[in-house]
Image: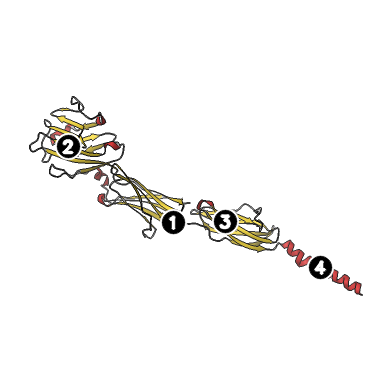
Amino acid sequence: MFHPQRKTMDLLPLVCLCLLTWSAGTAADHSPVVVKVEPGSDVILPCSLSPQKSITSEHFEWKKDGQKKVFEYDGGDHSNTILTDQDEQFRRRVSHFSDQLKNGNASIMIINTQLNDTGNYTCDFPDLQPRQTFYIKLVFGGAAPEPYVKTLKTDDGMVLQCAVRGASPQPKVEWKDSAGNILPAKEPQVTERGGSYNVILQAPLTKTDNFTCVVTQKEINHQISADIYALNGAAPEPSVKVVKTKDGELLQCVVRGVSPQPKVEWKDSAGNILPAKEPQVTERGGSYDVILQAPLTKTDHFTCVVTQEDINHQISADTYARNDSTGLVVGVFVPIILLVVGFVLVQTEL
Ligand SMILES: *[C@@H]1O[C@H](CO)[C@@H](O)[C@H](O)[C@H]1NC(C)=O
């Protein structure tokens, strides 16, 4: 019924680097460096003295939310050797970069990040003069992945649905038609977890077109989109007629360019479904043409009923058809009988 195609379009090829890009925070500047991580991935929390100076024999402490001891280093000893008051949450999950200490780099790596790892971290040099503290905020998400697009049947009819998961910062989500017009959409459903956003946007499907869901995170120069070819293929009134074939007269019902594939039936005026041949169905680009023929065996009012259950749509067309054999009775036998009767009467008179 539709053919999703996806395409990605990174405004900046360096977006991935943005995930770990940071600028030096200082004690005076409490606005944190924001680090984004995919759930379950490893992440480096950055912390470096500037100007550079070796910290091999210095003391630094990493804490989460002002209290939990994440990692501590003190002149060669650290949380993975003899320093023991590390929080249980971070046990055997945090390492530092010993070869970087000479460059004043106190960054740490946390493996397999989970939701409770998101939050505010500090990297503190308590013994330096002046004391230096760096602020780092860890959030889930990052550059939005390709949105998931589909058509969906709702109480209000068919809609286009676009779902974005794990995006941070909150993305703007829009549906556009092939001409680039933004479709009127409902208010998006937004949920947030650990600084990472899920957004679902629905727009009514009012025409057949190639639609694009565009997800934009201006702050990190990221845009990504996914396409879907969707048909608003509610069947129009079928065209009905009687066709003469070598097998006799047939009631013919034709439905064109509809989606999803409809069920087509011929009924008589009493509502009985007529025995019909196998319908001829052709499909192109997800849209269907159906031709249904049923033998015309009596004179009646006939209805061709087209049903698309998936989209709650039914439409029909009527025709009054005279059966040929009835026609033969009325058109040929009756005049002959009348003629014979007349002839007999005339003979009797004489
Ligand atoms: C600090 O070390 C980490 C790990 O090697 C590295 O990714 C980061 O770029 C370093 N920071 C600086 C400012 O060199």
From mark 1 to mark 2, how far is it between C-alphas? 51 Å
Q: Quadrant of ligand 1?
A: top left
**Closer to the eye: label 1 or 4:** 1
Q: Which mark is residue 177?
A: none
Q: Which mark is residue 123?
A: 2
The spot of residue 16 in percent (x, y) is 27, 44
Secondary structure, mark 3, is strand
33 displayed left or right of 224: left
Q: Is residue 16 visible?
A: yes
Secondary structure, mark 4, is helix
Residue labelled 3 has its Cβ within 8 Å of some atom of ligand 1: no
**Closer to the eye: label 3 or 4:** 3
Dividing the picture into quarters, in which one does residue 301 lie? Answer: bottom right
Q: Is residue 62 above or below residue 183?
A: above
Location of mark 1 (residue)? 205
**Closer to the eye: label 2 or 4:** 2
Q: Is residue 187 above or below residue 61?
A: below
Instruction: Work out whether mark 3 precedes mark 4 in sequence or the reverse, and give the earlier one.
Output: 3
Dividing the picture into quarters, in which one does residue 113 lie? Answer: top left
Location of mark 4 (residue)? 336
The spot of residue 226 in percent (x, y) is 37, 51
Type of amino acid under label 1: Leu
Q: Quadrant of the C terminus?
A: bottom right
The spot of residue 281 in percent (x, y) is 57, 53
Instruction: Work out whether mark 3 precedes mark 2 in sequence or the reverse, and give the earlier one.
Output: 2
